[in-house]
Image (cartoon, rainbow, N blue to C red):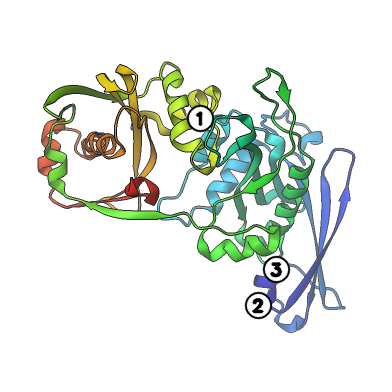
Amino acid sequence: EDSVETGKTMTESFFADSTGHRTITITIANKDDSKDPSPVDTDCTGTTKKDYILCSIVEGPLKNDGDNKDIKTLSEWTNFCAFCFSYKPSPPPASYFRRHYDNDPKKDASLIRVAVDPISNEIVSSVRIFRRRISSGGNDASSSNSIEACGIGEVCTHPNHRGQGLARILLHDAIRIMELLEGGGEVGEAGRDEITTVSCSLLHASPSLMAVYERSGNYESVTTRWSVVTINSSFLTSTKSITTINDDELTYNIRNASFPDDTTSLRPIHAKYSEQRFGGCIIRSDQYWNEYVSEELGDSLFILVADSVEGDEGSFSGIVAWLSIRSRGGENRYQLREFGADTEHITTSLALSMLLKFAFHAEQKKKNPTSAVEEVGDAVEESLELVLPSPILEE
């Protein structure tokens, strides 16, 4: 986009060496070199040439010798991402990007692609490829209703190197890699490894950037539906663990999730509540629950456990729902970032109501650590806003 505004046209050429590093030369032709905004010198023909190295990173650390001078490590990359996203109101630190990498069961440093300025030997642009298996929106649990996919993330460029098409070049490079990838070796129903090719790539982007990805990577923009509801402060003052339904007193206990103990119960509920209903949901393996979800959500993930609930198959005791919220865009605004319910044994509205009360208590407790949990609701005078997926609100 910047190249159009400044009247420049760009081409790039590639050279790959035996180590897998690719050297690209970007040629920028300036229509008016007297107004050339480029930080590098232009030649007498009115064109600017700039070399960059495209490569993958390594986890590191490296030996301190000359052979490693062109190799970029994971710590260098996480620091670079933190710098690029430091403009945000709540900027993510380098540890945020490192945690996302370390907790990913399918992490692969070779799928983090960067552009390096050979003069400064610094990372100047980045794209990361995530390996995932996602649902295709069927209503059963068969493996045919899931596909191998790759996500795109951590797309960023140093301010001094923007406007040269580096993100677009890295995106094309990532798509080329995804087209060559074999599947993740998921074990199928027959007990053998299924080797499938990546058939889908997806990413999250702000509306202002959707057109960029449509042009650069042939992505199709879709919109997810979210709703905002107001929750009165009085909602927080009610009891948190005992509920009476149809004159039968049933006890529901709410606690923090415990992994790997809860995974056996959570995985089939998530499969039925989300994966089999909606396309694009991540198919969660035991490893994904135990290594990624548990670490990413931490003590914000609450479990609703029911005692002797009557269901279609008689009495039932066990996990019936879970929930996690996070502060989002203001002092009193929260986002529902994780929810699921066993709708054979509890309604969505009842599960959401009880878990939200407990989660809001926990959030207020963090802000007022000296108050007793039961008293926190009385201290909240303002209403709260909750951002949640519209399909859950409709339920």
In the image, what residue occupies the spot 73% across and 28% down? Answer: 63
Q: Quadrant of residue 189?
A: top right
- Disc nearest the viewer among 2 and 3: 2
What secondary structure is found at the residue carrying circle 3?
loop
Give the residue pinned by disc 3.
39
Please name the amino acid that badge 1 sits on. Tyr
Q: Which residue is mark 1?
A: 292
Q: Judge by depth and name the residue closer to the eye, 67 or 163.
A: 163
Sort mark 2 into few (<14), some (14-19) or many (20+) by Cα contacts within 10 Å: few
Nearer to us in this view, 60 or 21:
21
Alpha carbon distance from label 1 to label 3: 42 Å
Residue shown at 22% from the left, 39% from the top: 364
Query: In the displayed structure, does residue 296 sit left or right of residue 248?
Result: right
The residue to which callout 2 is attached is 5
Secondary element type, mark 2: helix
User: Which residue is found at the position 66% from the left and 31% from the top?
Assistant: 59
In the rendered structure, which disc, 2 or 3, sits on the residue that comes first in sequence? 2
Residue type (three-letter) at the residue carrying disc 2: Glu
141, 234: nearer the viewer: 141
